[in-house]
Image (cartoon, rainbow, N blue to C red):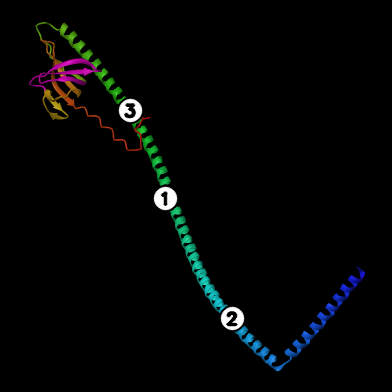
Amino acid sequence: MKSRAAWLGAGLAALVVGASACQDQDRSRQERTDNSPGHRVEEAQAQSEKAFDDARDAQKEASSQQREAARAQEDLQHKQQELQEAQAKAQKEAQEAQASQQQAQARTQQAQSVAQQAQASALAAQRQAQQNFATQQQQASNDSAAANQRIADQSAQQQQAANQNAATQQAAIAQNSQAPSTQAAPAQEQQISGDVLSASAQEVLVSQAGEPRLRLKVGPTTQVKVDGRDASAADIQEGAQVRASYTTDASSGEPEALRIDATSRAQPAAPAPVESGESSPGAR
């Protein structure tokens, strides 16, 4: 076994030595071939062609880069133009927004001024309405007081005239009863004032204090005036104020009118129409 192993080891060593020797021979032959002039020319041509190819590739690369640079420059110019347009548009929109804001502020100020003027006008109208209302109330109060005073004065005058007429009639009756039957006493003229309850061509019924007081006979000699103008007893309106003089007929005892002065009662004035937004005096 040991001799066989030794033999195998020796064989392997011989193979290694032989392989090394072959490699050395190949390397020597290659060096001789590389150093020959023809080989060097071929290498130079190959290097030259490679250099031309590299130059062409570099030129193509440079041209491609130039085209890309031109496109980039064009894109940059386009972007710059878009940026300028966007800036101009933004500036224009900002100016328009500022103008719109100024117009809105002007309209707001104008509206506020109009509102203030309207409010001032409304306050002035309200004060004027209150003043007019107070004036109307005062005028109504004064008119009412004056009307009450006139009614009181008329009532007093009518009562006084009624008292005087009653006293005159009583005196006349007493005088007639005391006079001799064979001698007629002269008729005494008497006065009466009051309101007309009814009137016709033959008689006028005079009222005092709302009560029928005296029925005056109207004859051909009776003088009748209405509102200062000559008229007939039939022209006297119901409710007119009269002042009459009369005598009492001795035979019949009926009063006969000598003169009748009638004053037509004025129609009450229609109330003024109430303006819109104002209340009439006394209204609530």
The earlier-in-sequence mark between 2 and 1 is 2
Query: What number is the disc on residue 162?
Result: none
Q: Please tell me whether mark 3 or mark 2 is closer to you in this view.
A: 2
Q: Nearer the viewer, residue 139 or 80?
A: 80
| Image quadrant in which the N terminus is located | bottom right
The earlier-in-sequence mark between 3 and 2 is 2
Instruction: Classify 64 as above or below 133.
Output: below
Marks 1/3 in contact by CB < 8 Å: the verdict is no
Q: Amino acid at mark 2?
A: Ala
Secondary element under disc 2, as helix, strand or loop, is helix
Q: Which residue is mark 3?
A: 144
Q: Nearer the viewer, residue 167 or 28?
A: 28
Give the extent of the magenta segment.
194-222
Q: Which residue is mark 2?
A: 62
Marks 3/2 in contact by CB < 8 Å: the verdict is no
Q: CA distance from mark 3 to mark 2?
A: 119 Å
Instruction: Classify 118 as above or below 272.
Output: below
For disc 3, the neighbor class at 10 Å (few under 14, some 14 to 19, many from 20) is few
Q: Residue 14 falls in which quadrant of the image?
A: bottom right
Tell me residue 157's x, y (percent): 26, 21
Q: Amino acid at mark 1?
A: Val
Q: Nearer the viewer, residue 203 or 136?
A: 136
Tell me residue 148's x, y (percent): 32, 25
Instruction: Classify 85 as above or below 205.
Output: below
| Image quadrant in which the C terminus is located | top left
Tell me residue 125's x, y (percent): 39, 42
Q: Which residue is mark 1?
A: 114
Q: Please tell me whether mark 2 or mark 1 is closer to you in this view.
A: 2
Instruction: Classify 53 as above or below 237.
Output: below
Secondary element under disc 3, as helix, strand or loop, is helix
Secondary element under disc 1, as helix, strand or loop, is helix
